[in-house]
Amino acid sequence: MAPKAIIAPSILSADFASLGHDCSKTISQGADWLHVDIMDGHFVPNLTWGPPIVAKIRGHVDKPTEAYGKGTFDCHMMIAEPKKWVKEFKKAGCDLYCFHYEAAFSTAAESPEAKSDEKTSPKELIKYIHNQGMLAGIALKPATSVDVLWEILESEDPKERPDMVLIMTVEPGFGGQKFMASELPKVQELRKRYPELNIEVDGGLGPATIDQAADAGANVIVAGSAVFGAQDPSEVIALLREAVEKRNGKL
Ligand SMILES: O=C(CO)[C@H](O)[C@H](O)COP(=O)(O)O
């Protein structure tokens, strides 16, 4: 069965001065998840926020009552050392910790204070995230081949397999960029092999680009400027959902 449509507004385009209010509002306007962009100024050339702010906005949005449910905090970790921050983000209220494949071979240190010369790996990191009680996602930058994922998705240990794959359709770092249709063959290939996988796309999604992404097989749709910049965000959220459901044959 094709996975359901999940609309996850990127709060990078919210009003940072009233973040809690904007987050609860987008959920009441029909959003399923919040896409929380974490940037460290190293992995990407931009900075956003850390666990204290995530914990504050968690206070404005009810925790999901089931896995993948409404209010899921989908934390997109655009950071150079993803293992270091797993426990901190769990404590802050993150539900789905999505790290970048490109950063997954970095230090195995388990906290901001800890030091380690050991390296981790994508499969180890996924297992570690699962063991901390969160869903795990793995993200690919545009330059990274989708072929790196097959061995991870086929891991014998289910705890080493991701719950979601994120295909970036812009270079990570900033909102409001142009959608890269060149990334859609990755989505098509993933959907062909994994009909039930949650496949997220992020960057430049909106009314003008959603049909291409939905046709390729994406079901988790991140949209920042298209939602927060809309006159009627609920209309845009409904339109994004409808495109995915149509492709799933549910409409
Ligand atoms: O991860 C991101 C940037 O790295 C953002 O989530 C993404 O770009 C969303 O913004 P928009 O929908 O405006 O393109």
Image (cartoon, grey):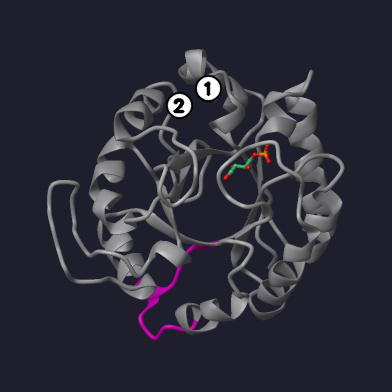
| CB contact under 8 Å: marks 2 and 1 | yes
245 vs 84, nearest the viewer = 84
Residue that numbered label 2 is attached to = 61
- The type of residue carrying mark 1 is Ser
For this view, does 69 lie left or right of residue 130?
right
Q: From what the image shows, is residue 182 above or below residue 36? A: below
Q: Position of residue 181 (x, y in %)?
A: 80, 59
Q: Quadrant where the N terminus lies?
A: bottom right
Label 2 residue SS: loop
Ligand 1 positioned in quadrant: top right
- The type of residue carrying mark 2 is Val
Q: Does the magenta stretch include residue 117?
A: no
Q: Where is residue 189 in the image (x, y as percent from the top left)?
A: 71, 76
Q: Which residue is drawn at 62% across and 69% down?
A: 196
Residue that numbered label 1 is attached to = 24
Number of labels in the image equals 2
Q: Which residue is drawn at 53% across and 24% down?
A: 23
Residue 33 falls in image quadrant: top right
Crowd rating for badge 1 (residues with CA inside 10 Å; few <14, some 14–19, many 20+): some
Q: Position of residue 25 (x, y in %)?
A: 58, 20
Q: Is residue 163 magenta?
A: yes
Q: Residue at x 59, y 67 (%)?
A: 197
Q: Which residue is drawn at 14% across and 63% down?
A: 116
237 vs 231, nearest the viewer = 231
Sequence-earlier tag: 2 or 1: 1
Please give the range of residues in magenta. Answer: 154-165
For this view, does 194 lie left or right of residue 76?
right
